Image: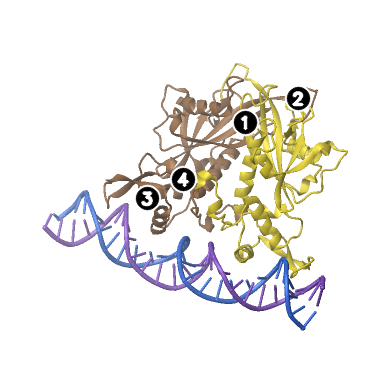
Chain colours: A yellow, B brown, C purple, D blue
Amino acid sequence: MTDEQWTPPVVLLAVDLVILTLRESRLQILLVERGIEPYKGALALPGGFLQHPEESLTAAAHRELSEEADMDVATLTLEHLGVYGDPGRDPRGRVVSVAFLAIAPWLPEPTAGTDAANAEWQEIDRVLSGELELAFDHRRIVADGVERARVKLEHSALATAFCGPTFTITDLQEVYEAVWGIRLDPRNFYRKVQKTDGFIVAAGSERKSATGRPARLFKAGPRKVLYPPMVRPTELLTPEEQ
Amino acid sequence: MTDEQWTPPVVLLAVDLVILTLRESRLQILLVERGIEPYKGALALPGGFLQHPEESLTAAAHRELSEEADMDVATLTLEHLGVYGDPGRDPRGRVVSVAFLAIAPWLPEPTAGTDAANAEWQEIDRVLSGELELAFDHRRIVADGVERARVKLEHSALATAFCGPTFTITDLQEVYEAVWGIRLDPRNFYRKVQKTDGFIVAAGSERKSATGRPARLFKAGPRKVLYPPMVRPTELLTPEEQ
DNA sequence: CTAGCTTTTTGTCAGATTGACAAAAATGGG
DNA sequence: CCCATTTTTGTCAATCTGACAAAAAGCTAG
């Protein structure tokens, strides 16, 4: 933001969305099939260019969220993830993309007849392993988004965003297990979430499943930051964290 | 990144740098006095527009770092902080600024005769309190940068970046105390950093100060991620974390 | 050269937390 | 009414934390 009487270069600004959810106890991500070049036919993150020069980044992210994922925007957490603006990442020119992370509490299959018609949930592992190829540098963005979700599970109540309005403690544990990719001890998990004041609060009734003891229902509490944090077992840290 | 046959709006891209250091046991930030409109004469973060369309964001950040702060780029940590792109934040048009956070290990006064001639260190408290007014939305960016530093002190070895090549444990403790704004118990701090393998390693000699028992010298170890983390006493959490 | 001051380093101990394993409680089904 | 299943609770050793205290090592003044 210093001086210049010379014309600074301009760029095209886009937003990309990493939308994560839990389906069948597995972490999944919403991807769309690109309809145009470049990377026509390839899988990519939902997103797009700013619609008009006055549109804010978060507004654009919310717009794409409702257009392409057909989601009730208000209920979702939406958080800035990063900026991906290396020259050469898009053959159309200098495109700088601002990525957002959204956590969705279970969703039906994307509804046809909308912009999201060609959107579908994919297992996160198939993306990270490279089995599914993504357009641009989107795989890198996905990796960053997943890592962000892992970290946020430690220090925030984000896990409840994966669940519906009410959930059992086992449901919540499955969120942690799916995102972290590890098994947790039920007793210790129970103790931890119960003693973290305001993390979850009782929601009255119980849920009976087909079999087994009925589970108590909870809902997200007022606390958004967890102190002390949930601790991720050291076995599952990323390499450079060892 | 969806389809369009219409021309997407363009924006001007800038980088802004939050450069923090410790001077006299206080957290300080490098600010420059703006030489041109808008906000001419006001204090602002070092930064500027991309120099040419092929310049990468990190390259621009490094360039500004060496130009305006006159720093040896290679030795500094430089990390993406956030994106600030609300319409209307810059009267010249749609400017999207990518902010970076840099931690500097003590520096002499900014040298005259360079781009950094009008740069000076300011106490972070004077900025956050509003006593010093900053251009644009830079105060918000500073606040985000400080909060990022606070959090990173917990989970990473970032604190060593505030110190020189060698330092004492008391030096390190003063980093934590200055950034967190709280006093720590020396015994417990000592125990914690010593038992976190790879955080700091002995550097041989000792440093004699004017008075008192000589302190052992250490240098930054290989570990960059702290597990378990340093814990910030609960008294000093931000309001929404309570 | 020694007493006193300052700063660093180490001791200690009660209370809290974690990790691991086990047992009890509640429900539906045969 | 016994059994399988799932949720919930007990327990206990090992570890970590918070608080306070004391020892160690150098410098300086007299």
Q: Is residue B66 left or right of residue A27?
A: left
Residue ID for mark 4: B157
Whether callout 4 and callout 2 share a subunit is answered no
Q: Amino acid at mark 4?
A: Ala
The nearer-to-camera label among 4 and 2 is 2
Q: Quadrant of residue B160?
A: top left
Which of the image's four quarters has the N terminus of chain B? top right
Q: Chain of mark 4?
A: B
In this rendering, the answer to whether B133 lies above or below A149 is: above
Residue A92 in the image: above or below residue B223: above
Alpha carbons under labels 4 and 2: distance apart? 44 Å
Residue receiving disc 2: A37
Marks 4 and 3 sit apart, C-alpha to C-alpha, by: 15 Å
Question: Is there one chain holding both mark 1 and mark 3?
Answer: yes
Q: From the viewer's perspective, is the residue at label 1 or at label 2 nearer?
A: 2
Q: Say which residue label 3 marks.
A: B170
